[in-house]
Amino acid sequence: MSPRGPRHAAAVQRLVALVPARLAHAGGIYQARVQDPIARTDDDEPEPDLAIVRAGDYDSDHPGPGDVVLVVEVADSSFAADRRKVGEYAQVAIPEAWIIDVARRRVLLHRSPDPARGTYADVTTLTEGTLSVAGIEIDVAELFPAHR
């Protein structure tokens, strides 16, 4: 995998600035994990750019698919690989996955996993509007730098 570029890093930092603070105000039911493993299977632990998981003590084990409500992949030069990873998340029924496509300033919102097919039945491309998950809302515009 090639090194993360500045646009990728900046997009992850925007997520870090937005998501944990909003989750804290949403009752503490969920927590954010940034570039940390999730136990997709016994021998596969992907590290999404951000995951929202049920709040808990993960000192002994990484959160598993049943703990994860959202995975987010930031795509700059990694769009094809991130699409493949989203299919792997569908295989274990993670309810929602986003690909933040920084080059095209859009979010591909994946819902309704079909584990047998390794796909999501509902895929929506957003360039504006509001994303809602885990009791929080994020405006798509907040995920991208302001135009200059």
Image (cartoon, grey):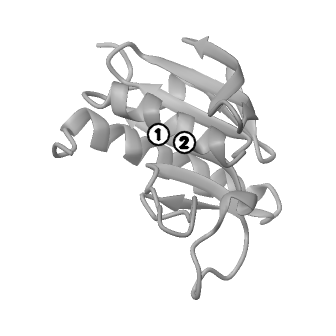
Which kind of residue does numbered mark 2 sit on? Glu
The residue singled out by tag 1 in the image is 85
**Residue 136: numbered disc:** none
User: Splitting the image into 4 quarters, where does residue 36 fall?
Assistant: bottom left
Q: Is residue 142 left or right of residue 74?
A: right
Q: Is residue 127 above or below residue 111?
A: above
Judging depth in this view, the residue of 136 and 60 nearest the camera is 60
Give the residue displayed 66% in from the left and 30% down from the top: 117
Q: Position of residue 77 (x, y in %)?
A: 24, 28
Crowd around label 2: few <14 · some 14–19 · many ≥20 (10 Å): some
The residue singled out by tag 2 in the image is 88
Identity of the residue furthest to the bottom in this view: 60
User: Splitting the image into 4 quarters, where does residue 57 fall?
Assistant: bottom right
Q: CA distance from mark 1 to mark 2?
A: 5 Å
Identity of the residue furthest to the front in this view: 116
Quarter the N terminus occupies: top left
